[in-house]
Amino acid sequence: MIDAYEDPGEPDCRGGGRYLWWLVTQQAGRSALGALISAVWMVLLAATPYLLSRAVDEGLAPGDYAALVAWTGVLAGVHVFNAWLSIMRHRTMTRVRMDALFRTIKVLVGQSVRLGAALPRRIGTGEVVTIGVGDVHTISSSLTVIGPGFGAIVAYLAVAVLLVSVSVPIAVVVLLGMPAIAVLVGPLLGRLQGTETEYRERQGVLTARIADLAGGLRVLNGLGGKDLVADAFHHDSQRLRAQGYRVGAVTSWVQALGMGLPTLFLAVVTWLAARLAAQGAITVGELVSVYGYVAVLVRPMAFVVDMGYEVARGVVAARRVVRFLRLEPMPDTGTRDAPAEPAALHDPESGVRVLPGRLTALAAALPADATAVVDRLGRYVPSAATWGDVPLSEIALPQLRARVLVADHEADLFAGTLRELIAGHADGPDEAAATRAVHTAVAEDIVRGLPDGLDTSIDAQGRNLSGGQRQRVRLIRALLADPDVLLAIEPTSALDAHTEARVAERLHTERQGRTTVVTTTSPLLLDRADTVHFLVDGKVTATGSHRELLDGEPGYRALVARDEDAEEAIR
């Protein structure tokens, strides 16, 4: 089975079927062993009627009890050996399934890391969750039927060969039976792929709604939009249920035909063999063997139908995985070096110019406008933004990421100790640097309140912290990274006025001489900024200090007054 640290290989992303085949070839030896064991297991199942017929014709019919005991012993030995083979088949195919499961998970995680910040811009949260929770298991489960399916085909051909020695007409009927079943079941499998694909798409949409509700229920409740979103969720869930019924209808037909057609086939062949026995064309022992052969064939034929069903579902799931693996991160065509000395950042689209070594604030009536400027200055979207005289698009991305940090107020917090959480990519923060960052973020109370201080375990997404504590932890992490340029989105939006005022003062002092940009409409933070850009409809309409804009820009004054009123209410 694949090792946790082993390279999973380069997946074949040309289609769902090709991806499944890639998973098989990555463990070709194990897959071949599973197919071989399955083939021997099923052939020995098919050999049981032959041994039984020999016991009847050579032992029971003439009264030769020695021969009867001998054939019975062989029959018992074959069953014991086949029981062991069944165990080995299950173990081998389980290893095939687990390898496919973990290999798929590794390529998906690797692709997520490769996409990086582009991931949420390329695919929805619901789609990612659906792939990770459902599709990987469907893909791995589909591989477990390939071995038994191959064995079923081998057993089917072996039985046909054995029947030739009994009756050519019966052998012909048996040989034509499986293709006939394939013709009847095949169209249903094609329809199953279509209904399953639509079901998975609707499931992704509904999962995305669940994620949105989980993250924004408090806000929706405050705005009075909870009932509206609940109605939309109810409507989507009803559509998903209806589509699930359609998938279930096709699935029920596939499974019913998978068991019903082989049983009907057994009845036809048994009737034909009985007529031949009555006419004296075959012996009673041969009649027993024919019945046994065909009775045994019911299981392999059901395996073949089940293989078609599972592979069809696996192909649908693999297509979704392949579609995710085909996503490309932002292209990095940059070859130039970043400016060696502090230089101004400029976004021509908005008119924002960030002077080096200063604390610059972006105040926008629509927060999304300020966030869009930060995305362009951080090169998370294509733009004509420049750093000094160099277009950001021409700077090598690793250099840019090492020196320019975008700190989102909703950035993910991974599970681990608080020390590990704030360290980011570093092995561990310097104690003095960590203490200074905690002080700047006014987070001493957080560290003191935790049982083990910085070594206290924090849940994923900081669920055991309050909203304000999570925001300050994110700020600590950004400060410890110590970037040349820090672009912080709403870094104090969840803090009370008293804490926010201290954060604003300390942030200005700590980042003195280094470029810092914050998006905010808080007068406490704006008052500490060296330069404030007031944006309307995504464009700079006024630039100056906080006091200058209050005196000379009515729109800015009206925007900031809303936050002042809110702060007075908090006080």
Image (cartoon, rainbow, N blue to C red):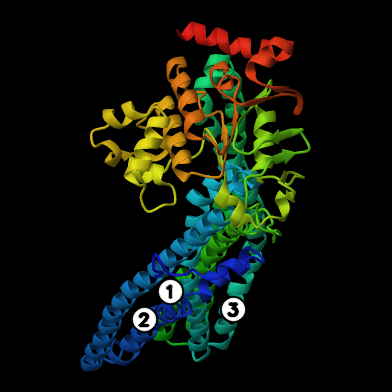
- Relative depth, front residue between 81 and 118: 118
The mark lying in front, picked from 3 and 2, is 2
| Mark 2 residue element | helix
- Relative depth, front residue between 129 and 381: 381
Res 481 label:
none
Disc 1 residue type (three-letter): Val
The mark lying in front, picked from 1 and 3, is 1
Residue 216 image position (x, y, % from top left): 53, 26
Q: Residues at badges 1 and 3 in contact (C-beta under 8 Å)?
A: no
Residue that badge 1 annotates: 296
Q: Residues within 10 Å of mark 1 (few under 14, many from 20)?
A: many
Disc 3 residue type (three-letter): Val
Seen in the picture, residue 544 relative to 54 is either above or below; the reply is above
Viewport quadrant of the N terminus:
bottom left
Seen in the picture, residue 334 relative to 172 is either above or below; the reply is above
Rendered residue at 37%/47% (across/down) = 429
Residue 28 image position (x, y, % from top left): 48, 79
Q: Residues within 10 Å of mark 3 (few under 14, many from 20)?
A: some
Residue that badge 2 annotates: 48
Rendered residue at 52%/23% (across/down) = 493
